[in-house]
Image (cartoon, helix red, strand yellow):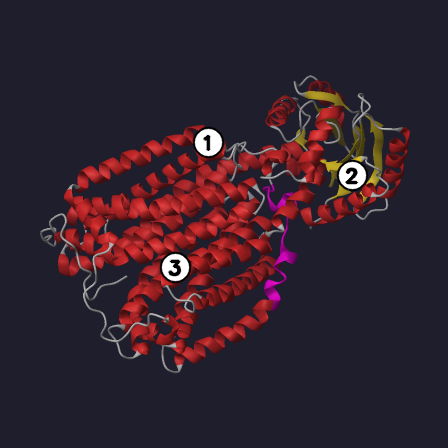
Amino acid sequence: MLRKLAALPSGRVGKWVVIALWAVVLVPALMLAGKLGDAEENDNAAWLPGNAESTAVAERAQKVMPIDSVPAIVVYDRAGGVTPADLAKARADAKAFRGVENVVGTPQGPVASQDGEAIRTVVQVHKDKSGWEGLGKTVDAMTDIGGKGADGLGFHIAGPAGHGADSIKAFGGGGALTTITALVVVAILLVTYRSPLLPLLPLITVGVALTAAKALIYLLARDTGLVVNKQTGFILVVLVFGAATDYALLLTSRYREELARHRDRHKAMAEALYRSGPAIVASAATVAISLLLLTLAVLNSTKGMGPACAVGVLVGLLAMVTLMPALLVACGRWIFWPVKPAYGAEGEKKESVWNRVGNAVSGRPRLVWAGTAAVLAAMALGTLGLDASGLSNKDQFTGKPQVVVAEEVRAAHFPAGAGDPVYVVAAAGAADRVRTTLAGVPGIGAVADPVVRDGEAVLLAQLTDEPSGEAARRTVERARTAVHRIEGADARVGGSTAIMVDTENAAARDSTVIIPIVLLVVLLILAVLLRAVVAPLLLMATVLLSFGAALGVSGLVFEHVLGLAGADASYPLLAFVFLVALGIDYNIFLVTRIREDTLPHGTRRAALTGLSSTGGVITSAGVVLAGTFAAMASLPLVFAVELGFTVAFGVLLDTIVVRSVLVTALVLDAGRWMWWPGALFRRRDDVPSPAGEAVRTPARSGT
């Protein structure tokens, strides 16, 4: 049955049917994929769980006063002091701001700073379902107004509205990210394939897969309530390009081998797909299942990312086992030009670097795996200094966009928390007690008189620290502890700082819950695939070591090389899921090959032939995946740079060191015990090749 399925997309007629079917799918997919941006939700609800305290505050306070808005803190500055004309312009601008779409209420100010060098106006901007998109348009319109007739007067927009506007511009680099990712993939494939034409086929296939995936995700977002945001969008692009290209490399490598054994290219592809297909499917299934486990998250941004990215991986898999084989067969052997694989030209394989690595490891495998594990464990110590407690607004960008400049100007001339208050809702009868308690919390400045309506009271309190900083977040936690103790008050604390606190708490909970479940599920998948217990346990141990080492080195690089302030709260979980799910792929490719070669050669000999056979293609796949994630650094966002670096470094570490050295040494040392208690455990191992003896790839073996 598997052989028949493998022959379908590579048949003489089947290839044209497959190409035609994908062409039919592509027509509506192009239209639907373009609408994905319309389905994105970037408001608070798209990130926070519904039971978050800040979410509850927003719902309750809305009954008393409109708080579905965020402050745009407009700051003017002039070296040497602002003039009466500057103050007059600020007043005129404040009136003009009221005519801008989504500006609500009456602007507060303008107010001159005590040092006389700056002016501040606070404008409330309605934040609808478009989230940052809407904020960006409003801020741009206000910037146009402020820039007219400035005559050297500095104009800046700080606060949550300014941050949201610059964030959407940073995420707006998604088109450039796609281009950069495609160029990275093409460059690596040109080196790998040594052909100017062959890279076009995986690139076309990935493009079709990405379009189809976006279309399907749009339908899910529209009809099932799947939450999709800008963060999901750019990770989807990188993941589909990286994973799908990996599958293309494995398939094409096997196809090239089979072309030397079969005169008919259709039969060669059928055999290549039959032999490489199970490992590719198992790899994609592991990644997709791991991503689907993110639906257990309470942070909506993480929960929505899981199924969306899983769809991308599965569509990429489908395209690579149907469209890619059909295109390869339709093109014929000439697509490999200038080195076309000729029938009967298989011959004896030359000794490769992977032969030498295997033979070096086979000399003292126990010493090799113990030493390698010790080095990885030492690298993992860097995690002790990794700060993933979240980033302030100004620390979320790699460059210095206007909002960072605006926050610096505001902090230099005005109280830190001005214009971005803490919101507290409570029962009307307890309003005075809540106000008194809140005023006594360290870090809380002035507390306004409560606004009471329909049994609810809303109080606004000013923070003495910068609202997005660590000190302000701790103040919110103290305020919550204090007001929660007031009997009968039912008091809750919200606002932009509280939203950051709730996001951190939700991310910490998600990491604690999801990481153990992912480990267990991946372990079970390996146990079923390999029909053993020892091998899955050892492989999982290597992946955990690799993850720890990647995270540890990343923490040191972030702090001492890149000078970053810390990491986003969701960074550890996403780095874990991507590295474990993608890292286990290469172990699957290697160990399934070893398992198949164990039948004729025994486990220890199979460890060397498996490494020799898969070393080149797996390393190429790892470089491609690392390159695609490294392309995330093109976005001016700390989160993108950090996640991209960690996954790229971790994949290279796993590909070059963990898979080729650590896993190979463990298999050589464990021998047939790798397959305990399966049937292969009961087979006697052959005698391993002496160190230094080149190991030749067997003529027939799986991927």
Disc 1 residue type?
Leu
Mark 1–mark 3 Cα distance, whole angstroms, equals 36 Å
The reply to whether residue 311 is visible in this rendering is no
Precedes in sequence: disc 2 or disc 3 = 2
Judged left or right of residue 669, residue 481 is right
Image coords of residue 457 (percent x, y): 76, 30
- Within 10 Å of the Cα at label 1, are there few (<14), some (14-19), or many (20+) other Cα atoms? some
Closer-to-camera residue (180/621): 180
Precedes in sequence: disc 1 or disc 3 = 3
Image coords of residue 570 (percent x, y): 51, 40
Disc 3 residue type?
Val
Give the residues in magenta: 31-50
Q: Which residue is mark 2?
A: 124
Relative to 629, residue 549 above or below: above
- Within 10 Å of the Cα at label 2, are there few (<14), some (14-19), or many (20+) other Cα atoms? many
Q: Secondary structure at mark 1?
A: loop
Image coords of residue 429 (percent x, y): 75, 25
Q: Is residue 433 magenta?
A: no
Disc 2 residue type?
Gln
- Which residue corresponds to the image point at 48% horizontal and 33% vertical from the top-left? 561
In the rendered image, which quarter is residue 341 located in? bottom left
Residue 386 numbered mark, or none: 1
Q: Which residue is mark 3?
A: 191
